[in-house]
């Protein structure tokens, strides 16, 4: 069984609650140099009445992740129960090959120069809870899907 995030842009209000909940749970301090795991972006469709489009994005926990293929230190680990990929910072050398290889720009560095990314809140899921970002979404735009494979 694997889990995947699903996002419905038609339901997103752009409030950013998902990103804030993730930063809170993971003690991400932007002033200290941490980068958020989840971000909310906005684009504008021009016209007489411009339309704002929002997107909540984070690591996609790809089926065939390039980041894992390029990591020389085996610090990216897929959880066999959830399918989510996390960074073992004790193994990360900070070479950032994984960061530069991600086609979705979903990885960055923490304040110590180590690879940093969404880990999917695997421990919450294993305890029957939704990830912080999903719990915080007031419109239901961000959900967690279970995929039986």
Image (spheres, rainbow, N blue to C red):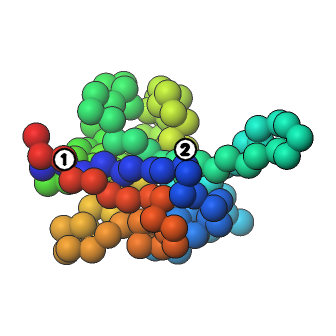
**Residue carrying label 2:** 108
Q: Does 31 sit left or right of 110 as displayed?
A: right
Q: Nearer the viewer, residue 6 or 115?
A: 6
| Residue 73 at x, y percent in the picture | 32, 35
Q: Residue at x 51, y 33 (%)?
A: 104
Q: Residues within 10 Å of mark 1 (few under 14, many from 20)?
A: few
Is residue 51 positioned above or below 17 on the image? above
Circle count: 2
Asked if residue 91 can be seen in this view, the reply is no
Front: mark 2 or 1: 1
Residue 23's disc is: none
Q: Does 108 sit left or right of 30 as displayed?
A: left
| Residue 52 at x, y percent in the picture | 74, 49
Q: Does 77 sit left or right of 140 as displayed?
A: left
| Residue 74 at x, y percent in the picture | 27, 37
Q: Nearer the viewer, residue 24 or 115?
A: 24
Quadrant the C terminus occupies:
top left
Q: Residue at x 89, y 41 (%)?
A: 48
Q: Nearer the viewer, residue 71 or 28?
A: 28
**Residue carrying label 1:** 147
Mark toward the start of the polypeptide (2 vs 1): 2
């Amino acid at each position: 069984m694997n889990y995947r995030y699903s996002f419905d842009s038609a339901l997103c209000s752009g409030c950013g609650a998902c990103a804030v909940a993730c930063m809170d749970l993971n003690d991400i301090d932007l002033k200290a140099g941490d980068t958020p795991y989840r971000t909310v972006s906005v684009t504008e469709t021009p016209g007489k009445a411009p339309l704002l489009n929002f997107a909540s994005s984070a690591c996609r926990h790809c089926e065939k992740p390039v980041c894992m293929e390029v990591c020389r230190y085996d610090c990216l680990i897929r959880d066999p129960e959830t399918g989510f990929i996390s960074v073992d910072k004790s193994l990360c050398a900070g070479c950032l090959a994984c960061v530069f290889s991600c086609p979705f720009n979903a990885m960055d560095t923490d304040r110590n120069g180590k690879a940093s990314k969404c880990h999917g809140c695997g421990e919450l899921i294993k305890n029957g809870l939704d990830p912080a970002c999903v719990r915080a979404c007031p419109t239901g735009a961000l959900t967690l899907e279970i995929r039986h494979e």
